[in-house]
Image (cartoon, rainbow, N blue to C red):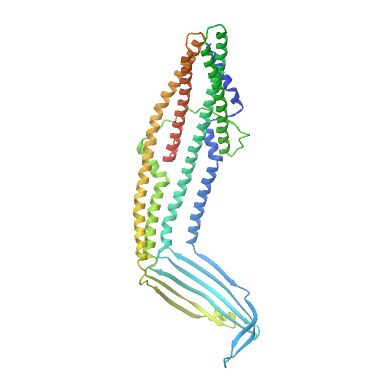
Amino acid sequence: MRIILPLLLFTATLAAQTADSLSLERFLQLATERSLQRQAAERDQALATLDNRSFRASLLPQLRATANVPNYNKTFSEITQPDGTVRFQPVQNNNSALGLALTQVLPLTGGTVFVQSNLQRFDDFETDFSLYNGLPFRVGLSQPIFAYNAIKWERQLAPLRLQEAQRQYTLQLEQLRVTATQLYFDLLLASQESRIADTNFVANERLYAIAQERYALGKVSRRDLLQLELEKLSAQRGQLRARQEYDQASAALAVFLGEDPNQHRYRPVEPSRELPVLELDENTALAWARARRPEWLAVQRRQLEARQQLARARRTDGPELQLTAAFGRVRSSGDLADIYQDALPEAFVELQVNVPIFDGGQRRARVQQAVVSQAYTEAAVQREILDLESQVRNTLRDFRSLEQELGLVQQLRELTEERFRITTESYVLGATPLTELTLAQREKDGAARTYVAALRAYWLTVADLRQLTLGQWQ
């Protein structure tokens, strides 16, 4: 009778032999390579990198060309005569222009330095008259005074956003591993239930056949026979449900990897709970989290953004001055060579002043709103940091606790399996009542489920620790 259970276990696993064997480590590797979450993480990182590149490019000199060629016009135009009457004269002309402009922003002041060069030609075909108007060069400065300097703030925020995006990419990959670990253990739990259901069905079918023989000999009561028949039918029903859940869990894994679930079916391999020896203490875990998690950079970014909003509120709609100054060379002539060889000097300075006198308190209200938002941001980010640090501590403690718990539930599983084997042999010999056999079977099944659940909790805690600290320690 000692060979009965091994034979039952062998029979119960025959149905799963057509599935591909898949370890947790291999699945995590495939998930990292193939899953849609990986593609989403790469997309987010690429967009953040391009956004930063675009901003840095905006700080470089910008060269722009303009052209209005041709600008031909043939029509009749209203001409007012000296006596006040109106006559419509034929007009046929072309007024073309070309221009180049080089601009450079000044991040520290928010101003713009510019260099311009323009050339305009006017042709009147009615009178056969041509004229050039040229600006060989103009150098100038446009400088707002007391205005909000957006570039100054963006120069501080852009590097933080890029670093945060890079850390967020790493975090997304670790979160992917958490999701993948959950899916894998969903399959492992379903596989465990399927094995339990198959084993129980074969065992109950065998026991029911033995009970029928003993009932015919008058050694078993009708009540016990019916109980065994009920157990067999219940085991058969459980077998059907377990197989359905197993197929669903296997399909979920295939879809997560971007595969056709009808073409790929997986059989999970129970992972080891052994990890490389590493003394991961609380201080080390917190240090890793502070140095690698994006939240700490997000704190700096959000605090800086709050100060940015306050600066914008204080500067917007307040007193503003706009200084524009330029000098260059300019000339109008019928000869193109004169434009560049004998140009005349030009210069202009302009100061625009805009001072709000009464706005009904709008600006003050906006400033107060920004102050309130900044105070809340300071409090919120500190609370979020405390919460994240608490998660690190609690997860590390759970990990230590689960290390010990796994050893206990493994012993429990081995003991209940041994008890069930002995009880089964004793029942076959007629030395043990049916109720004790049923109890031993349920204890065995419960211990098997408890072990896999503890194994799931252990490896999920490992994945949580990785994504909380971003430490490559597994």
Picture coordinates of residue 462, whole percent (x, y): 44, 34
Say which residue appears at 50% left-offset and 8% top-offset: 430
Residue 338 is left or right of residue 404, and the answer is right
Q: Nearer the viewer, residue 61 or 399?
A: 399
Q: Nearer the viewer, residue 38 or 104?
A: 38
Picture coordinates of residue 231, whole percent (x, y): 53, 19
Q: Where is 393 relative to 167, above or below? A: above
Say which residue appears at 35% left-offset and 38% top-offset: 283
Q: Where is 368 relative to 471, above or below? A: below
Q: Nearer the viewer, residue 343 or 429?
A: 429
Residue 445 visible in rendering: yes
Picture coordinates of residue 363, whole percent (x, y): 36, 65
Residue 250 is left or right of residue 386, and the answer is right
Residue situated furthest top in the rendering: 217
Q: Where is 74 relative to 223, above or below? A: below
Say which residue appears at 44% left-offset and 55% top-offset: 158
* Residue 12 location, quadrant: top right
Residue 21 visible in rendering: no
